[in-house]
Image: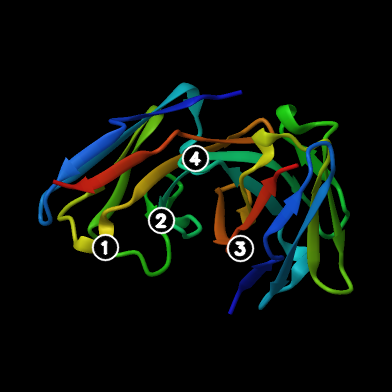
């Protein structure tokens, strides 16, 4: 099973700042099968990025994804108040899906 | 418009079973795999498995094999997930999620609202 490790665990930033979230895989992952989700308290996760870099429908262009192999990054160019949430990376491989443990983006 | 609506919160005793449903609407039910993901309070997401609503075929995460059963009823566009031999570790929120999957990508584009299962004697 591929293990995804996200860093940092918590990111304390102010609105307007840039957020850079990292996700490292224990072995190489196909970029096509890599996604990012956002989750707010009491809500289901929401798809942000699929195929490592494609934004889902309705996702603002301040969200961008990049990376390949074992290292992937989610960047939020300028944090808006509604962006403070927990972010999860996800991968598919060998008929199994795994998630990272999450990065919390909190208001500084 | 796609909607996944899950059954309501449950309270079960240790050792019992719980069955959670997820009713799909707004698309052709048999065209998309459905997954189940769970989340303990304040914790991350854990993939449990998936079902092919067309064939009924299933894939389970290794940690849930033998204790989780996923089924579907195509007449009412609903998938079910049953967990047996409940313990306090199963006191979590269960989500269903629709898979978009082809040779180019795999991801979950729509999610149910979640079902909280409480395990208490």
Mark 1 or 2: in front is 2
**In the picture, which quadrant includes the N terminus of chain A?**
top right
Q: Residue at x 15, y 55 (%)?
A: A78
Describe residue B2's horizontal placement relative to residue A64 as left or right: right
Describe residue A35's horizontal placement relative to residue A95 as left or right: left
Mark 4 or 3: in front is 3
Does label 2 lie on the same chain as label 3?
Answer: no
In terms of sequence position, does the residue under pointer 4 or pointer 2 come before the other? Answer: 2
**Residue A82 disc label:** 1
Kindly state the secondary structure of the residue where label 1 is placed: helix
How many angstroms separate mark 4 from mark 1 (CA)? 22 Å
The image position of residue B62, as x and y in percent, is 73, 27
Do labels 1 and 2 touch, CB within 8 Å?
Answer: no
- Disc 2: which residue: A41
Chain designation of label 1:
A
- Disc 4: which residue: A90
Kindly state the secondary structure of the residue where label 3 is placed: loop
Judging depth in this view, the residue of A37 and B44 nearest the camera is B44
Describe residue B32's horizontal placement relative to residue B30 as left or right: left
Indicate the quadrant where residue A24 lies: top left
How many angstroms separate mark 4 from mark 2 (CA)? 19 Å
- Disc 3: which residue: B112
Mark 4 or 1: in front is 1
How many angstroms separate mark 3 from mark 2 (CA)? 15 Å
Is residue A101 positioned above or below A88 on the image? above
């Amino acid at each position: 099973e591929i293990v995804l490790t996200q860093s940092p665990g918590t990111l304390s930033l102010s609105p307007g700042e840039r957020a850079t979230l990292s996700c490292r895989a224990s072995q190489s992952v196909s970029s096509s099968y890599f996604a990012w989700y956002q989750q707010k308290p009491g809500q289901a996760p929401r798809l942000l990025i699929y195929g490592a870099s494609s934004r889902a429908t309705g996702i603002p262009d301040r969200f961008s994804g990049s990376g390949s192999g074992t290292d992937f990054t989610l960047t939020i160019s300028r944090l808006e108040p509604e962006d403070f949430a927990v972010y999860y990376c996800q991968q598919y491989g060998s008929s199994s899906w795994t998630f990272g443990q999450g990065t919390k983006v909190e208001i500084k | 418009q796609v909607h996944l609506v899950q059954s309501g919160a449950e309270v079960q005793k240790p050792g019992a079973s719980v069955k959670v449903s997820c009713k799909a609407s707004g698309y052709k039910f048999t065209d998309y795999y459905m997954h189940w993901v769970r989340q303990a309070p304040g914790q991350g997401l854990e993939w449990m498995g998936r079902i092919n609503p067309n064939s009924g075929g299933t894939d389970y995460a290794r940690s849930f094999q033998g204790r989780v059963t996923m089924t579907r009823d195509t007449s009412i566009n609903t998938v079910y997930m049953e967990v047996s031999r409940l313990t306090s570790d199963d006191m979590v929120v269960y989500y269903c999620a629709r898979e978009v999957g082809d040779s180019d990508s795999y991801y979950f584009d729509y999610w149910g609202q979640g079902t909280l299962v409480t395990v208490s004697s």
